[in-house]
Amino acid sequence: MHYLFEPGLFASGPVRTALLVGAIVAVTSGVIGVFTVIRGQSFAGHSLADVATTGGSGAFLVGLNQFWGFLAAGIAAAALMEGIGVQRRRGRDVATGVVLGAALGAAALFLYLGTLHTSTTGASFTVLFGSIFVISPDTVPALIASGVIALVVVALLSRVLLLSSLSSDLARAKGVPVRIVGMVYLAALAVSVSLAAVAIGAVLSTALLIGPSATALRVAKSPGLAMAVSALTGVAATWIGIVLAYDSFYWPPLGHGWPVSFFVVALVLIGYLLTYVKRPRRLAPRSPHEGAECSPA
Amino acid sequence: MFTGLMLNTWIAGSIVAVIAGMVGFFAVLRGQTFAAHAIPNGAFAGAAGASLLGINVLWGLAVFAVGGALGIGALGSERQGRKGRNDVVTALGLVLMLGLGALFISVSSEYAEETYALLFGEVFGISQNEVLPILLLGIVSVVAIGVAFRPLMLTSALPEVAEARGVSTRRADLYFLVVMALATSMTVPVVGALLMFSLMIGPAAAARSVTARPGTALAFSVAIALVTVWISIALSYRTNWPLGFFVGVAGAVFYLLGQGARALGVSRTRLAA
């Protein structure tokens, strides 16, 4: 037992913070991720994370806490993407891509200016790959609050959101303001992505967003069950990842821990691949709508 | 601006632009924007691994890019139209490679400078020896696209007809992803992983919004990519700001111009009608 749980693991302040923040991040990402996968917005989710990098590096440049940078850029980008509001999925992908490309360019500039002025070259690494062990306890209440707000918003909207995800025409006919629901949902997504960016880094937050929920959707029958499974899978992956990262201090190369992000990503992926082993593929009938997606542009 | 090492920069940048314009055109046409984002980023992890092992970075890039392309292709597009599933697999493949990249970088001792260069590009200071492999890989990917031009067009535009004629959409997808991976492994050291994506999508999207004819759009896409790279190199040389910034912004500007031109064109045809 001592080999697995290093003595003093749970007494260490940073580790406790990491476990707490990790759990919040995993639950938020897990629940919101289910909608992301159902709505086919994996690319948007990932782009929000990358755009958040721009905010994070900008915040670093002016000396603010990264989280606020992540949050501001994420919500702005969400509004922009929904504002462009291309209805066809392929056009939407291209619009997302263009926004993303420009934002990444700005991130490059901010990071460059940051290294120029402060001469701390580790900034790009922290912004991009995160470090859950150096979260300052002051930000924890803010992290918890934003996570809870995002969850409550999504919970209130869940029925409407599910309906508009599965058939936006039906939702519109029932008088659901589809655009507004979509925008609120993307804002919640931006919050959850910012949280994940703090914990495991902007470019890897997609792992927590998509991995557990894709796994859950492959095994669970109903959306509610999928959300629960997804949140649990995410928390498990994060906690085991944190423990392993703490242990890895004694792995080669000695005296240099492996990043938490790596373990979390690896665990999430193993979970997803296990669903392929367990269940044989079921041939679902293709609906005409799916075929329509592929028609010439 | 046009002497010595800078000459290599101009040559390498131009080759990269031609490739990115061509590959990007098909990426936009086939709706594989996300893959175009995932493969360069994943390749970056391979480069980090290669520099950890002390071998040529190009090998790491090639192995990870092609491996990622095969993985995404194999797990993803089993049935056409299931785009959501495709995206999930692409996202997971991407984060796996990035996670490995994070590990490699953290284990190796000298990370910051190298990471920054691989992510955001280091176009200045390309040596003569580096131009040659870029040129070779570039020719290979142009030939690969040229040979399969018709099946690629057919499966992009009319997947049902292609299936009926015995052209497998899935195999075309896989083929294209591998070509994209090849193109990526040569471009990442020059423009960087994050911005290779902008160079593929921006010009191609702009070209597509101006014209619907495939040949013309392809030519436009290559031309816009070339102009983007040239402007960016010149500006980056003058200001010393990262090249990636200019590439990203120029891509978005050209896209907006293209959309604007199309909007004008549409309103004009409406008036005429």
Image (spheres, grey):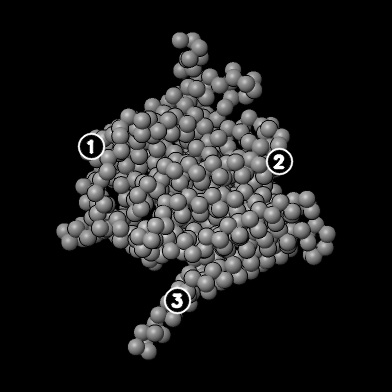
Secondary element at tag 2? loop
Identify the disc placed on residue A269. none
The image position of residue A4, as x and y in percent, is: 48, 14
Q: CA distance from mark 3 to mark 2?
A: 45 Å
Residue A82 visible in the picture: no
Query: For the residue carrying disc 3, how many other residues have a C-alpha within 10 Å: few (<14), some (14-19), or many (20+)?
Result: some
Query: For the residue carrying disc 1, how many other residues have a C-alpha within 10 Å: few (<14), some (14-19), or many (20+)?
Result: few
Mark 2 vs mark 1: same chain? no
Name the residue rendered at 26%, 52% in the picture: A286
Query: For the residue carrying disc 2, how many other residues have a C-alpha within 10 Å: few (<14), some (14-19), or many (20+)?
Result: few
- Residue ranking furthest to the top: A1
Q: CA distance from mark 2 to mark 1?
A: 48 Å
Q: Is residue B109 above or below residue B95?
A: above
Q: CA distance from mark 1 to mark 3?
A: 45 Å
Query: Reading the chain from its start, which is encountered first: label 3 or label 2?
Result: 2
Which chain does the numbered disc 3 sit on?
Answer: B
Residue for badge 3:
B262
Secondary element at tag 1? loop
Q: Amino acid at mark 1?
A: Lys
| Nearer the observer, A178 or B194 | B194
Which chain does the numbered disc 2 sit on?
Answer: B
Name the residue rendered at 58%, 25% in the picture: A257
The quarter in which the N terminus of chain A is drawn is: top left
Identify the disc placed on residue B56. 2
The image position of residue B29, as x and y in percent, is: 45, 63
- Residue ranking furthest to the right: B4
Identify the disc placed on residue A221. 1
Q: How many marks?
A: 3
